[in-house]
Each structure stands twice: as C-alpha cells, then as structure tokens.
Image: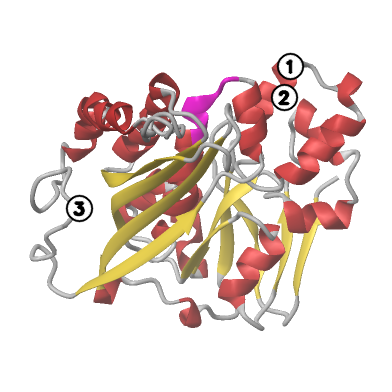
Amino acid sequence: MPDPLTYKQAGVDIHAAAELVGDIGALRARTEKHRQLFGAFGLFAAGFDLSGYREPVLFTGCDGVGTKLELLLKYDLLETAGKDLVAMSVNDILTTGADPVMFLDYVGVGKLDKAQIARVIGGIVEWCEACDCILAGGETAEMPGLVKEGTIELSGFAIGVAEKPEVIDPTSVADGDVLVGWPSDGFHANGWSLVRKVIARAEREFSDEEIIGMLAPTRLYHDVVAGLKAAGVRPRAMAHITGGGLPENLGRVLGDKGAALSVPRWENGAIGKVLSHVDPEDAKWTFNLGIGWVAVVPAADADRALGIGAATLLGEVGGGALTVTVDA
C-alpha cells in the first residue's frame, strides 16, 4: 500500500499559510490607527462597533482588478494590484455618502508565495490607510491545478456606514443641477481587455515605460468627498466612473433627466495611442475618458465644488437624454 499522503504533497502548504497571517499582521495593524475592530483580529469573523452612530445604515460593495491583473503581474506591480482592489470597492461605497470602515480581501494562488502576497497586501494596506478603512481580514486560498502558478485571483469587499440623514439620494437630482468631474489617474481597473487587445495588435507603438505608466493605480476619491463636505456642499448624487463609462454610470443616478456632457480631451500620450485604435463611441462606454468621479450638485454650489482639487464643470442636468461629447 502506498505511503499516506500529506496536504503539502497535494500542493497546499497549510503551515506556510498560517505563517503568512503572522507575517502580514504588522502591515494590517497600520489600518487601525483611527478605527478599531470590535474584538481581536484573527477570529473567524470581524466586528465593528456601530454604537457611535445614531442611525447607522450599512453599505457593501465588492469588485476585483479584472484583466489589468495580467499586465500588473507581467510588470511586477503587485502593490498596484492591491491598491486597485481597495479603490474599486471603496469608491463605490463613497458614492453613497458612507464612510468606508472595513475591507476584506480574497487571494487565490496556485502555489503560495509569501513575499508575493505580502506585496499585494502592502498595496491594500496603503490605500486602506489613506481612506481610514480597516483591513478587517480576508482569505488566502492555495489551489494547485485550478489556479496556474504565477497567477493570482483577487477579490475585494468593502463595508461602509452612514448616518441615515446623510445618505446620498439620487432621486433628489433636478433639472438645472450641474455635474462636476474630477480626473482619473489613467484607465484605472476597467477596459483592460480592450487595452490589452490594442497593445497586442500594435505592440511596436508602445514602450514598456508607456505601458507601466498606463498601469497607475485606481485613484481613491475620499479626498474629493471630504472636500465637498468641508465646503458645505451636499451632492445630490455621486458616481464612480468604472465599466460602462460616463454614459452608464451617470445614467444610474440621472435616470430619465439626462444631461449634455462636454468632457475635456484626455491629454496623455500613451492613452491617446490606445484611443486612436478604438471606436470613439465605444470608448465612451468602455473607459472613464479621464474623469474618474462626478458629483451632481445644485447650481448654487457649483463654484464651491469647482474649488476642490482639479475639478471640471461637465454640464447641466436636463434635456431628457444623456450625451457625452469629447472636446477636440
């Protein structure tokens, strides 16, 4: 009879996985500077005390990094993958008026590489710290035969809390409100299947330096939301511009009210090369066009909103149809 098998011989090293939890403990602890979990980290579930809120409303969101991950792995930009993971979910939470309070990650690998995973977690921690969100826990799964070695599967999950009277209500959007946009830092984590197709078809047009530049991490917009609050501006609605671009994401909050948007030309050499290979109309529904965040505010608050960061006036609500025009 053959010798008994171990889990490690099947490709899963449970002891290395346990050590990894300890290795990233100091990293994770950095996210509890201002908010703390209710109870100890490392239990089977994470808790957060809501007694500091009068009328708490919970919001949840989840997302991933998409096919951008292939290029992030190729160019060894593991920290960026972690940042993308946080921003894609946390930005969605921010659109509701909620504070992001907890984040959890899922990492699936073919073979455990502690240094590799620690770098991804390092990126997660940096972006969680930036928006005062606790890295509450997660799951690392070693799945030999299902996930190829050298590949990572990533998912992120965010939880936010808002006081009920402070929840953003898109149904309050009215004709005459204005749309104010803030710039993205690139394609973020959307549309990369098309970007990769363009690069593969016209690879001689793109240097490694240009590709790495386009792989900038997804921007967190907590500073914009905080700036609006500090300026006394209460948005009627906010939108994180992800898959579906400006038409789809703004369509969610504008409903049938419509708006005519005029978007500044996206001045970026490498991105311009990509867009030159893409149908212009399709690009509007695939990419953020250089605008990663939009707030709909009353016209009376427009000047205050435009004074926050590198804001741009995009248009006015009304007309019944949503159109997007890119400036020449």
Q: Position of residue 228 (x, y in %)?
A: 38, 54
For the residues marked 1 and 2, what is the alpha-carbon distance in whole angstroms?
5 Å
For the residues marked 2 and 3, what is the alpha-carbon distance in whole angstroms?
40 Å
Q: Position of residue 32 (x, y in %)?
A: 18, 39
At mark 2, the secondary structure is helix
Image quarter hosting the N terminus: top left
257 above or below 219? below
Please give the residue where the numbered disc 3 appears in the rendered image: 44
Please give the residue where the numbered disc 2 appears in the rendered image: 211
Q: Which residue type carries mark 3?
A: Phe
State left or right for residue 50 relative to residue 102.
Answer: left
Q: Residues within 10 Å of mark 3 (few under 14, many from 20)?
A: few
Query: Is residue 77 found inside the magenta-colored segment of the image?
Result: yes
Whether pointer 1 and pointer 2 mark residues with C-beta atoms closer than 8 Å, the reply is: yes
Q: Nearer the viewer, residue 186 or 112?
A: 112
Q: Position of residue 74 (x, y in %)?
A: 65, 23
Residue lying at 90% horizontally and 51% vertically, measured from the top left: 279
Q: Nearer the viewer, residue 159 or 6?
A: 6
Query: Is residue 9 found inside the magenta-colored segment of the image?
Result: no
At mark 1, the secondary structure is helix
Q: Which residue type carries mark 2?
A: Ile
